[in-house]
Amino acid sequence: MKRKIIEIDEALCNGCGNCITACAEGALQLIEGKARLVSDVYCDGLGACIGECPTGALTVVEREAPAFDEEAAARHVKEGKEEKETGNIGTLACGCPGAAAMTFDTGDAPADTVSARSALSHFPVKLQLIHPQAPYLKGADLLLMADCCALCYPGLHQNLLRGKAVAMGCPKLDDLNAHIGKLVQIVRSGGIRSITVVHMEVPCCSGFVQAARLALRQAGADLPLRHITISRRGEILEQGAVDTCACCSA
């Protein structure tokens, strides 16, 4: 049949992931850094995702496609949620040693001088491996950081890590929906008191800001949400609040 369906211009897509979280049917996924339509039958053609695209890469076109299958889309979304709930909690079925929670003493090194001592206070640091109820999250300010920032910003330990819990990932290459699900679990556990997102200046990296915003909204939590933008040369380009009331922002 000929019907309306979403079309993605890959040349314009920057991989930010905003459209994916906006699609209630789960029709879109990030594949190799680009938004892709995973199945025609999951797309209702209404274009709810279009308004979330910052580059204009999404349009609704009319072409030959199988009919939208509402039941199949619902099953698809349910299966995705079940995978997050059962397979992304922070302890792996293989018993991976890297998932074991550890706490370190960072000492009293002065914050205004360069120190060879790490300011990292816990492990693991990958968001996929962190348990939502890990003890180091209780009463913590969470630093949600894109992987590349750790290498680009020379003042990481002195200026950002000190006194914070950190969770790292890649907003472009990782499963952003899985990261949102994990953040919802962390927020609902009631441990953290704020989120600061540290991301690179490239557009796709700001997906972590959107992920944090959506996680707070889904968790129904009103926590301070801030962001810091790092340049590829390791400079802080921008920092400030993202939302006054993150759980209520549209």
Image (cartoon, helix red, strand yellow):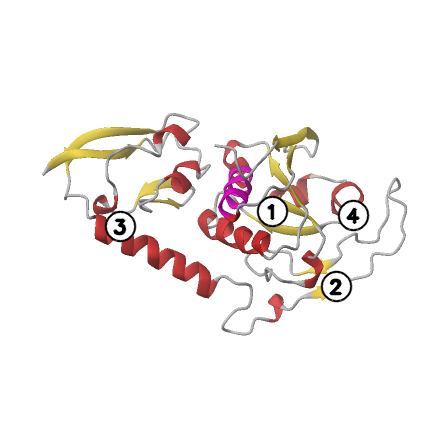
Query: Residue extending furthest top?
Result: 56
Q: Compared with residue 38, is residue 130 higher up or lower down, i.e. above or below?
A: below
Q: Which residues are magenta?
A: 209-218
Q: Which mark is residue 147?
A: 1
Are discs 3 and 4 less than 8 Å apart at CB?
Answer: no
Point out the image quarter for the N terminus. Answer: top left
- Mark 3, secondary structure of its residue: helix
| Residue wearing tag 4 | 162
Residue at the image point whose x is 55% and y is 74% from the top: 95
- Residue 180, percent from left and from top: 50, 48
Mark 4 closeness class: few <14, some 14–19, many ≥20 residues within 10 Å: some
| Residue wearing tag 2 | 103
Between 249 and 69, the residue placed more toward the observer is 249
Q: Nearer the viewer, mark 4 or mark 1?
A: 4
* Label 4, label 1: how far apart the Cα atoms are: 17 Å
Mark 2 closeness class: few <14, some 14–19, many ≥20 residues within 10 Å: few
- Residue 46, percent from left and from top: 26, 33
The disc labelled 2 sits on which kind of residue? Thr
Q: Compared with residue 49, is residue 191 higher up or lower down, i.e. above or below?
A: below
Q: Counting residues from the N terminus, which is met first, the one under dot 2 or under dot 3?
A: 3
The disc labelled 3 sits on which kind of residue? Ala
Q: Is residue 180 left or right of residue 47?
A: right
